[in-house]
Image: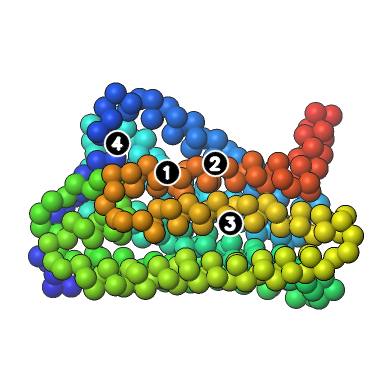
Amino acid sequence: MEELGNTTVKEFILLAFTNFHQFQILLFIVILLMYITSVAGNFAIVVLVKAGPTLHCPMYYFIGVFAALEMLFVSVTVPKLLANLITSNKKISFIGCFVQLYVFNALGVTECYLLAVMAFDRDLAINHPLRYSPIMNYFFVIVLVNMPFIVSFIIALIPTIFTAALTFCGPNEINHFFCDLAPVQNLACSNPFVSNIVTSVAAIFASLTPFILILGFYIHIIITITKIKSVEGKHKAFSTCSSHLTVACLFYSSVIIVYLKPKGSQYDKFLALIYTIIIPLLNPFIYTLRNKDVKEALHKIISLKLRH
């Protein structure tokens, strides 16, 4: 707390894509269209899950929550980026920066754990079909939905506090389009070693732990599917989790690309676009195009609306 008093920086400058002056308007238009499509697509999934009687089961409830989470996730960073692209004001307040940093990381970690919950749901459904309904009762589903939020917001809080406790007295330009732990820590005047270690440990619990869980669940699922004799049975078993597996692969591959490479690259902000907006944009299409139940529910709702 003493070091917080020594901090003289009151605001940060988000440089975003200022090096590409001639492409600012083009980037604004493209990112705005992607943002609108992403929010609209994920909102449609939420509405579809709520309105479609055939989708009133734990699997689709989790998909609906994940879609709602995606809308929040993109809205933490993209509106500020859009404003940054078309206005001369690139500033974000010190407090605003840390609020964005915390909420962004908390929601990102929540996605990691919710994907693990969804993998557990599919593993239970495929490997223990007779026990699935008694176990996945209303109360247990609510617990499974809320636990990722509770765990993630605690995990994200710890490195945020340690980073905020650093002294910021000099450079305040962040070469990114949003506030994240590493770019902010690099601007500290005091030694960020402890906060870097805390961030690394938090990252293990934030991404590696749920990734190992997902990997374990899907290895178990694949082993079970290979034992099914009929081709139709194998296809049916795998089709129930193919959409989720695709989303999980896209999400974790983008995170690995961004975070397992040397920090400070000028391409960091471009790579960050993958998991901040491109993945949330693709998710609704993956769930509607690869999921038979969702397509049927969508067709029924559209047919019903056309009749009226």
The answer to whether residue 98 of the structure is visible from this angle is no
Q: Which residue appears at 71% of the width and 57% of the height?
A: 241
- Give me the residue at 79% from left, 37% from top: 299
Q: CB under 8 Å between callouts 1 and 4?
A: no
Q: Quadrant of the C terminus?
A: top right
- Occupied quadrant, residue 192: bottom left
Helix, strand or loop for disc 3: helix
Label ID, residue 296: none
Q: Which residue is labeled 4 in the image?
A: 17
Q: Which residue corresponds to mark 1? A: 273
Secondary structure at badge 2 equals helix
- In this picture, is 47 found above or below 102? above
Q: Position of residue 145 (x, y in %)?
A: 60, 66
Q: For the residues labelled 4 and 3, say whether their Cβ atoms are less than 8 Å apart.
A: no
Residue count near mark 2 (Cα–Cα under 10 Å), binned few <14, some 14–19, many ≥20: many
Spatial CA distance of label 4 from label 3 is: 29 Å
As shown in the figure, which amino acid type bears the numbered disc 3?
Ala
Q: Amino acid at mark 2?
A: Leu
Residue 265 seen from this side: yes
Q: CA distance from mark 1 to mark 3?
A: 17 Å
The tag earlier along the polypeptide, 2 or 4, is 4
The residue to which callout 3 is attached is: 248
**Residue drawn at (90%, 60%), measured in percent from left and top?**
230
Q: What is the three-letter code of the residue carrying label 1?
A: Leu
Which residue is tagged 2? 281
Q: Distance from label 1 to label 2 (Cα)?
A: 11 Å
